Each structure stands twice: as structure tokens, then as C-alpha cells.
Image: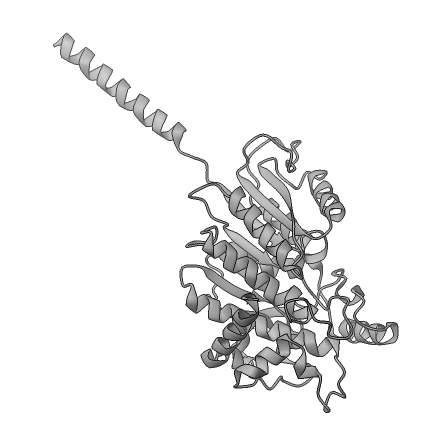
Amino acid sequence: MILWTLLLLLYNRLLISIVATDTIMQPTKQYYYAVTGANAGLGLESVRQLASLHAAQHDNDDACSDEDATSTSDVTIFLLCRNPVSAQQAIDSLTSTKECPANVNLKYVPFDSSDRSSVKTATETLSQAIPYGQIIDGLLLNAGGFTSDRSGTLTTNGTTIIAETNLIGHAVLVDGLIQSKTLQEGSRVIFSGSEAGMGEPFAIKWGNELDYYVNILNGKAYKTKMNKNKYKPQDGYGHIKGMIAFYASAMARHHRDIYFATVSPGSTKDTYLMDQGSFPNALNYLVKGFICLSGQHGVDVGAGRYIDALVDDGWGYESGTFVCSKKGYIGEVCDATELKKGRPFGEQAKQDLVYEAVHSFMLK
């Protein structure tokens, strides 16, 4: 009887030991995010909010690690930027504050969305940095804007700079990461959209022919008598932002295991959107005045829209949705197709035309 009691006690201790060991050996979930244009404005604020969301329970005196850290982190955020100096300044600004937790690892990746070779190199860097079996949990495609181009200058790939920077370069990045299986089931891809993509002040009359979208990408749409053969940055910006929404919707149907959305941050202060050099000074002040009168919210609110889409499975919008301001440029958001000017974004035929147009330039 005593022997059986001893054996039973030993058996129980063995079970407890196995369970404890199994619990200890459970791997910590590793999160990987990438943000383009992450050195300032909405990109930098998005990185800050991502870091804050993934704060681990640790000593508040710890600061997050930079790219030279040797310890394994629970969260890695890749900052994809053109300028290494501004990228390091962004990392320093985050690591010097206590709001960035110690379990967050920040890494700079050189990236210029207007330069196809830079995009491909960044794709390879990210694909090699993510361990086998892991994925990029969230990819925020924030880089772009009006750019500094005033004349519809073409890249070596035959697209306008504004098209390559905002749309084509990002499309190449996403395609490469899908091919390397760095983006796959469970990943979320968020394109930066804009209410300008619906037209301001009048709705854009989107075409029903492939050439219509091809000509926007190669700039021929602006070389007409109606436009006096003159490219206007505001026209190019609105068209490209609209095409981004169509493209993301098409991608959602082509890759149903990956979540895609286009999200407008709304009219946001301190983003330097109007200071990129695309407008003459007089027109720049005029547009800035219109934006201010229309209402603006802080960069934290604009970035918050991105983060809600990037990390929240209960966000409430289906993959492929274009989410924008419900009224004007700030405040409550909605599915763009709920708005009169946004109804075309629900048309699959137009989505497919944009998808085909974009891919025709990706192959060059």
C-alpha cells in the first residue's frame, strides 16, 4: 500500500513537471510589421502607435531596442525610408522615449518607392529578415503624396513619378512579398488612401476602358487639349489615390487569405503633404487655406485610422474596402461605396481594369 502511494506521488510529480516544462517551452509570439515612409508624419506616428500597442509587461525604465540589438524581441517593426539619416533620427526619437517598450525592435530598411531596384532590394531584405514559418503581420503602405514633380515627369518604367511612388512601387513590393510567402494567410496590407480619390469638388468620372487607366499611369491622360497639355499635381494625385482603392479591392479578390484595405487618414496636420514642392508658392498657400477651412485633425488621429485597420480583426470592414471620412475630410469613417461619389469603387469591372493596368507596368 505504501509502495503504491509512493508510486502515485512520483507519477503526479512527473505530470506536473511535464506540464510546467511544456508551458515554459511554448514559443513567444513574434509580430512583424513594415511601414513605408516611416521617418516622419503619419508613418512615424503609426510606428509609435504600433510599438505602444504591443507593450509588454516590463520595467518602465526600459527603452525599445534599435537595429543593433542582439536580444530577440516580441515585436519587430521595419521602417522603410529613403533617407538613412532621417530614418535613424526617427528611430532615435522613439527609442529615447519611455512610451516605446523594450520588447520592440526597430529596423531601418532602405526603400524608395519610385525606384524599382530599391523596391526589389527592400523586398529581398524583408523576405530574408522574417524567419521561416513567420509572416509580416501588417504592412502599411504610407509613402507617397504629391511628390515634388510639377510636370508629369516619367520614370524609366514609363509611369509618372506620382504613380510610381504612390501605387506601382508599392504594388511591386506587395507582389514580391507574396511570392516569397512573407505575406500570406493572416497578413494585413493597408494602402494609404484619400478622399481626393473620389474627386474634389466634383466626382471623378472613372472610365470603362483599359486605356483610360493606362493613360493615367503613363501621364497621357493629361496631355490633352482639354487640359491644355498641362499636368496638374492635384489631378494626378486624385486619380492615383482613386486607383489605389480599386487596386486594393482587386488584390483582395485575388488573394483571399490576405486582408487588404485602402484607408484614408483624413485631413491631417503636420504631415508635410503640401510641402513636397509640387505646387508653386501662391497655389500652395491657397490649397493650404482650403484644407484648413475644411477642417483637420491631429496626426495621432490620422495614424489611428491606419492602426485600427492594420491590427484589429474586429475592425468591421471586409477585405477590399476603401474606408474614408463619412463627411468631409475628418470625423466618422465609412465604406466609400456608401457615398454617392464613392459608389464606383464597388464595381469589380473597374477594379479589374486597374489591376490589369498596374500589372502591365509592373512587368517592365
The foreground one among 12 and 345 is: 345
Q: Could you tell me which residue is drawn at 46 percent across and 57 percent down?
A: 313
Image height of 227 relative to 17, above or below: below
Residue at the far bottom: name it: 225
Q: Is residue 335 visible?
A: no
Q: Could you tell me which residue is drawn at 18 percent across and 13 percent down?
A: 7
340 relative position to 252: left or right: right
The foreground one among 338 and 171 is: 171
Name the spot of residue 244 as percent of width and height, x first. 58, 70
Name the spot of residue 161 as percent of width and height, x first. 69, 68
Image height of 180 relative to 243, above or below: above
Find residue 91 and report its image quarter: top right
Q: Could you tell me which residue is drawn at 80 percent across and 64 percent down?
A: 275
Name the spot of residue 47 as percent of width and height, x first. 63, 49
| Coloring applied to the structure | one colour
Image height of 249 relative to 111, above or below: below
Residue at the far top: name it: 2
Task: For the C terminus, give its image quadrant.
Answer: bottom right
Name the spot of residue 182 as percent of width and height, x first. 48, 50
Residue at the far right: name it: 282
The foreground one among 129 and 220 is: 220
Q: Is residue 289 visible?
A: yes
Find residue 107 and report its image quarter: top right
Total marks shown come to: 0
344 relative position to 185: left or right: right
Task: For the N terminus, give its image quadrant.
Answer: top left
